[in-house]
Image (cartoon, helix red, strand yellow):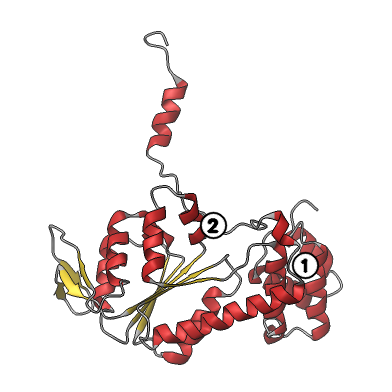
């Protein structure tokens, strides 16, 4: 490039240089190999998913009871992971005195403070969709320390400044013992990331090794659809005032338009339920416009 001529390619590199590229792999529809897609019947998938969610409930109760140090729940968004865990939390600690639920981005300092505040046995921290924790070396190191299976789990953060617990005005020590329990609810496919290799793979393998890990086994469009039917049958829409006839129409709409539905999740079923409750006569027309693409 002649001197003084603006090099667009270098400019683009500079522009992109500060933008982190996430190596994290979310669950994807139909990510299962084609030869396996035809091996399971709907009945087998239904049973498999029921078993997984029953195990999730049992393991969540074990975490709340302090019987396990940490639990990772991995599966696609919007299909009942958080709902199942939150239902157990509400029954166990309705006043929210023994647990906290953290959603979204978490910095290392915020993590260290939260670990200190809920460090005692019988206290529980739930990280729901806080996958930024797995992108930072500092937060990963802390998580590996507090999720370990050893009798004494000590965590350190040797910052050059003192951190204060805002609730008590107490200075947080730079090292303390953690006896609480942590539950991670994640949309990440931990196994796929670990199998792929790369910088994060050994860290996520270490987290799986230290925690009880549940993969909810929803990899295909059929899995998603059958899970949605399960939750609708359990009362997702009837609790919102829909009749059995309206429930069936919602399910038929999803089945008929599954290639065009904007997202396969319980949220879309609720949206469709709201539309049919509003006006059953114009339901399909409204649903195609607001809940589908490409129609």
* Residue 4 makes an appearance in the image: yes
Instruction: From this view, report whether residue 208 is shown above or below residue 29.
Output: below
Residue drawn at x 42%, y 24% is 10
Where in the figure is residue 295, as x and y percent of width and height? 81, 53
Spatial CA span between label 1 and label 2: 23 Å
User: In this figure, which residue is indicated by the disc labeled 1?
Assistant: 254
Residue drawn at x 81%, y 78% is 248
Q: Earlier in the sequence, mark 1 or mark 2?
A: 2
Where in the figure is residue 64, as x and y percent of width and height? 40, 86
Report the front residue among 98 and 51: 51
Graded by Cα atoms within 10 Å as few (under 14), some (14 to 19) or many (20 or more), the crowding at tag 1 reads many
**Tag 2, which secondary structure?**
loop
Where in the figure is residue 157, as x and y percent of width and height? 19, 63
User: In this figure, which residue is indicated by the disc labeled 2?
Assistant: 26
Which one is in front in this view, the residue at disc 1 or the one at disc 2?
Answer: 2
Tell whether 246 sits left or right of 94: right
Residue drawn at x 36%, y 57% is 203
Residue drawn at x 83%, y 82% is 245
């Amino acid at each position: 490039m002649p001197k003084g001529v603006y090099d667009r390619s270098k400019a683009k590199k500079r522009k992109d240089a500060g933008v982190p590229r996430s190596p994290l792999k979310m669950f994807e529809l139909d990510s299962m190999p084609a030869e396996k897609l035809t091996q399971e019947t709907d009945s087998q998938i239904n049973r498999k998913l029921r078993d997984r969610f029953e195990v999730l409930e049992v393991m969540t109760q074990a975490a709340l009871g302090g019987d396990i140090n940490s639990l990772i729940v991995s599966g696609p968004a919007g299909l009942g992971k958080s709902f199942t865990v939150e239902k157990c939390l509400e029954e166990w600690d309705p006043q929210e005195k023994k647990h906290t639920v953290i959603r979204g981005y978490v910095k290392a300092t915020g993590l260290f403070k939260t670990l200190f505040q809920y460090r005692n046995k019988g206290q529980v921290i739930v990280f729901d969709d806080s996958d930024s924790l797995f992108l930072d070396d500092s937060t990963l190191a802390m998580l590996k320390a507090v999720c370990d299976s050893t009798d004494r789990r000590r965590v350190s953060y040797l910052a050059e400044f003192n951190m204060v617990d805002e609730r008590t005005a107490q200075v947080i020590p730079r090292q303390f013992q953690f006896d609480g329990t942590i539950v991670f609810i994640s949309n990440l496919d931990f196994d796929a990331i670990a199998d792929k290799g790369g910088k994060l793979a050994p860290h996520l393998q270490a987290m799986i090794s230290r925690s009880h890990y549940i993969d909810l086994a929803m990899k295909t469009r059929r899995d998603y659809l059958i899970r949605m039917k399960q939750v609708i049958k359990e009362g997702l829409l009837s609790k919102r005032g829909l009749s059995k006839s309206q429930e069936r129409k919602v399910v038929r709409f999803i089945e008929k338009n599954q290639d065009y539905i904007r997202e396969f999740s319980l949220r879309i079923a609720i949206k469709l339920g709201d539309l049919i409750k509003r006006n059953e006569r114009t339901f399909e027309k409204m649903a195609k416009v607001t809940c589908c693409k490409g129609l």
